[in-house]
Image (tube, coloured by chain):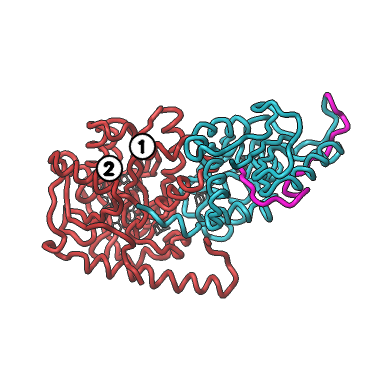
Chain colours: A cyan, B red
């Protein structure tokens, strides 16, 4: 039985909904997943030791020592720690928090999990699609490092994701060919296509990273070419 | 260098329906496949590059034969077809979607399927991926310069554009045909096309283009099992007329020549970018 836990810090439950959306499919495929901890889906009070995969959703409130402890503890208990979703991967909307909000006015600083502890994989997206979550878990179980490489890179270097990536990494580098994949991937419709190039509305961008992660002109893993 | 990528077989073909042939660019393969799919339940929505005011290209979701036909024909300018794919799923409720695109757009959709981070419930709804051959594309204002300044035609008068026989062709609604040598259009090409290593849409289920087949016919590469099934169904239903690629002129040799020309030229550009430290997709 592969032990999987879902741990939650500062987030909205959207990633959990995506995860729940996959659950049947995972059972189908593996018949071997044991959900050993999830505040909403399992009746367990403590994250057990030695979990194969911990999917941690949410950013870490640095003004809350409890959150920091959960982050550290998850790192210790997980063989593979996955920053699940944009809040954990790149901060997402919580990047904009600056405290003084009910009911915890003193909670003013939020960092993505990837900046607090070493994560093995990060799945951006707000929320990531159930298909992406299944694909990552399957690949992690199989040890398919080639497939996982982009997710491992995001865990290391992806914490500044933002719609600006399109300008800085693609258009400014004369790489954009105007496919519109970024616009379709954006969950907030911050990206529109203007004369064949993406235009990002900074007022709407929540920094989820989906746009630049989907762009084939930044990253195009060779294995995508294996079609049948 | 491998000119075409993997494929099962290649054929020369054209649509059997005269109305499709009249409105389409070449053999009407894309429109015929779309219409066949929509009318026979293999597809319930298809993505097209429609033309709007002043020959601008706009991606649309089409669900009827008329909509497919009104978007037939090549627009030599970027049209972000991927951008409407989620609206096909969410707003149109499609679950068997046909997609057409240039080779780069086919790469994008394959990436969206393999790494569907922001594509919730989309990958399993893509039923057919059709690629079109592509040497280069133009930003809208690049195409406009070619049409207005080099050919002396106003954009509002354009009904069709084409590339062939070393020339860029513009057809007007007044029945005029203007041309300019292709070499004079190079300065207006989209620069990002110069790192592109795919001429024949190597990752599509079915790829098609005019090169290799006689006028009014198209060359088709069948690349996947899905594409093979689909094409066989169309042929069996009489939606396509086909000929052996070996028996038509100019044949695959010309496709190979152009594919290698593109790849060799762009491989050099990629080397150059590497030397000066500019990034490439990796
Ligand atoms: C930029 C560009 C460069 C090309 N270069 C070559 C070439 O070098 N050699 C060659 O043989 N063929 C080339 N083609 C393909 C060729 O022009 C025809 O599109 C192809 O043969 C299909 O013709 P058809 O009669 O089968 O399709 P049709 O039935 O006419 O349908 C064409 C389909 O393509 C879609 N489409 C049109 N323009 C675009 C666009 N800009 N982006 C995405 N989709 C679009 C339309 O919506 C339509 O659904 C190029 C096409 C484009 C868009
Ligand atoms: S996905 Fe990348 S290449 Fe495609 S339009 Fe967006 S920025 Fe340009
Ligand atoms: S532009 Fe959209 S997809 Fe890109 S980071 Fe912002 S919200 Fe996310
Ligand atoms: S040359 Fe390549 S990058 Fe340019 S439009 Fe054609 S397929 Fe896309």
Choose between B128 and A96: the one closer to the eye.
B128
SS at mark 1? strand
Quarter holding residue B239: top left
Choose between B150 and A137: the one closer to the eye.
A137
* Spot occupied by residue B149 in the image (x, y as percentages of width and height): 37, 57
Q: CA distance from mark 1 to mark 2?
A: 17 Å
Badge 2 local density, few (<14 within 10 Å), some, or many (20+)?
many
Q: Subunit of mark 2?
A: B
Choose between B97 and B187: the one closer to the eye.
B97
The answer to whether mark 2 is within 8 Å of ligand 1 is: yes
- Residue plotted at (71% across, 33% down): A11
Q: In the drawing, does residue B203 fall left or right of residue A55?
A: left
SS at mark 2? loop
- Residue placed farthest to the front in the image? A1
Q: Which residue is mark 2?
A: B72
Q: Is residue A110 magenta?
A: yes
Q: Subunit of mark 1?
A: B
Q: Is residue A151 magenta?
A: no
Select label 1 or label 2 by which is in front: 1
Sequence order check: which comes first, mark 1 or mark 2? 2
Q: Which segment did they paint magenta?
A: A103-124
Quarter holding residue B91: top left
* Spot occupied by residue B173 in the image (x, y as percentages of width and height): 25, 44
The answer to whether residue B178 is visible is: no
Quarter holding residue A44: top right
* Spot occupied by residue A165 in the image (x, y as percentages of width and height): 62, 51
* Spot occupied by residue A112 in the image (x, y as percentages of width and height): 73, 44
Q: Which residue is mark 1?
A: B97
Badge 1 local density, few (<14 within 10 Å), some, or many (20+)?
many
């Amino acid at each position: 039985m592969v032990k999987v836990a879902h741990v939650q810090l500062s987030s909205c439950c959207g990633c959990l909904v995506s995860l729940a959306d996959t659950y049947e499919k995972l059972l189908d495929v593996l018949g071997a997943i044991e959900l050993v901890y999830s505040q909403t889906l399992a009746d367990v009070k403590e994250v057990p030791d030695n979990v194969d995969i911990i999917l941690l959703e949410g950013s870490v409130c640095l003004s809350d020592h409890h959150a920091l402890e959960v982050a550290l503890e998850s790192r210790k208990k997980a063989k593979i720690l996955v920053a699940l979703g944009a809040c954990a991967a790149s901060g997402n909307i919580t990047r904009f928090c600056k405290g003084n909000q009910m009911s915890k006015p003193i909670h003013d600083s939020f960092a993505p999990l990837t900046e607090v502890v070493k994560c093995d994989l990060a799945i951006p997206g707000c929320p990531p699609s159930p298909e992406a979550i299944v694909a990552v878990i399957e690949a992690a179980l199989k040890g398919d490092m080639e497939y996982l490489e982009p997710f491992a890179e995001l865990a290391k270097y992806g914490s500044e994701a933002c719609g600006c990536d399109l300008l800085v990494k693609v258009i400014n580098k004369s790489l954009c060919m105007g496919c519109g994949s970024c616009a379709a991937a954006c969950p907030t419709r911050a990206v529109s296509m203007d004369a064949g190039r993406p235009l990002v509305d900074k007022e709407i961008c929540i920094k989820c990273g989906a746009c630049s992660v989907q762009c084939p002109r930044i990253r195009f893993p060779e294995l995508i070419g294996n079609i049948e | 260098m491998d000119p075409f990528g993997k494929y099962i077989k290649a054929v020369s073909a054209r649509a059997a329906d005269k109305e499709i042939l009249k409105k389409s660019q070449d053999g009407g393969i894309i429109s015929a496949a779309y219409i066949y799919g929509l009318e026979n339940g293999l597809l319930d929505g298809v993505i097209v590059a429609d033309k709007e005011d002043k020959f601008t290209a706009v991606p649309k979701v089409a669900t009827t034969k008329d909509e497919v036909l009104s978007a037939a024909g090549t627009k030599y300018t970027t049209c972000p077809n991927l951008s409407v794919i989620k609206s096909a799923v969410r707003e149109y409720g499609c679950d068997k979607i046909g997609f057409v695109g240039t080779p780069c757009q086919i790469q994008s959709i394959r990436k969206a399927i393999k790494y569907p981070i922001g594509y919730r419930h989309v990958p399993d709804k893509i039923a057919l991926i059709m690629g079109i051959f592509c040497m280069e594309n133009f930003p809208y204002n690049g195409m406009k310069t070619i049409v207005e300044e080099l050919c002396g035609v106003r954009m509002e008068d354009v009904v069709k554009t084409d590339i062939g026989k070393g020339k860029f062709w513009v057809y007007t609604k007044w029945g005029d045909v203007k041309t300019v040598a292709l070499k004079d259009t190079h300065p207006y090409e989209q620069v990002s096309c110069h790192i592109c290593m795919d001429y024949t849409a190597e990752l599509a289920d079915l790829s098609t283009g005019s090169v290799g087949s006689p006028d009014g016919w198209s060359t088709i590469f069948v690349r996947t099992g899905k594409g093979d099934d689909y094409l066989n169904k169309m042929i069996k239903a009489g939606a396509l007329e086909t000929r052996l690629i070996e028996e038509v002129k100019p044949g695959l040799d010309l496709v190979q020549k152009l594919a290698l020309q593109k790849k060799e030229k762009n491989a050099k550009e990629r080397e150059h970018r590497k030397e000066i430290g500019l990034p490439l997709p990796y």
